[in-house]
Image (tube, rainbow, N blue to C red):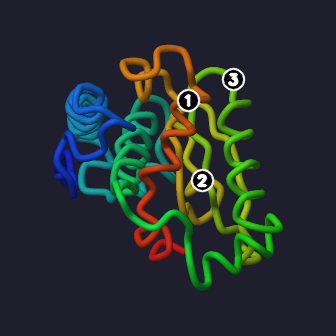
Amino acid sequence: MKFELPTLPYELDALEPFITKRTLEFHYGKHHQTYVTNLNNLVMETKFENATIETIIKEGEGQIFNNAAQVWNHTFFFMSFKKGGKTAPEGPLADALNKSFGNFNDFKETFTKAALSLFGSGWVWLVKNNGGSLEIINESNAGNPLRKGLKPIMTCDVWEHAYYLDYQNRRADFITAFWNIIDWDVIENRF
């Protein structure tokens, strides 16, 4: 199976000023593409050559896992955005967030704190656990909740390449901007 860089559901400048075209050209166009290219090269003539990316994430090790997870994580991340959408989820997801975190603002605060507290590079995830409740977890480097049997709902990439061109070392400013472009329709559908 040949993996490909997915087409974004928006133009490269559609998320400005929160994420600029320049950042997407590098983060999506170069970083994400490199993970796709690397994964295709690494799986050739291995047991993963025709495997799904989810299988590779669950069973792969080393560079094969790292590149597969980064392809999946970045695709999941980039497909979560829309400028000018709803400012909060509705329906069953809103109810689940209230049940797990008290209210939407408490969820945002907890998620933001998790993103700020992750040392180094990685991802902060909103996941549904096997009991059906929601949790926020941090994963270092290419970590992916699928490997733990959890269902990913939303993620924020806190590798510096996600925000350095727009925000330099100001991760907090990037996370504040992140909340302005979440496509809650997409997140609700994942729930």
Decide which of 136, 140 is in the foreground and name it.
136
- State how far apart marks 2 and 3 are (Cα): 18 Å
Residue positioned 36% across, 18% down in the render: 165
Q: Residue furthest right?
A: 102
Is the C-beta separation of discs 1 and 3 under 8 Å? no
x and y, in percent, of residue 43 in the image: 28, 40
Q: Secondary structure at mark 1?
A: helix
x and y, in percent, of residue 6 in the image: 20, 51
Decide which of 12, 5 is in the foreground and name it.
12
Q: Secondary structure at mark 2?
A: helix
Mark 2 sits on what residue? 145
Mark 1 sits on what residue? 173
Q: Quadrant of residue 88?
A: bottom right
- State how far apart marks 1 and 2 are (Cα): 25 Å
Q: Secondary structure at mark 3?
A: loop
* Mark identifier at residue 119: 3
Residue positioned 21% across, 58% down in the render: 9
Q: Earlier in the sequence, mark 2 or mark 3?
A: 3
Identity, as a three-letter code, of the amino acid under mark 3: Phe
Identity, as a three-letter code, of the amino acid under mark 2: Pro
Residue positioned 56% across, 20% down in the render: 170
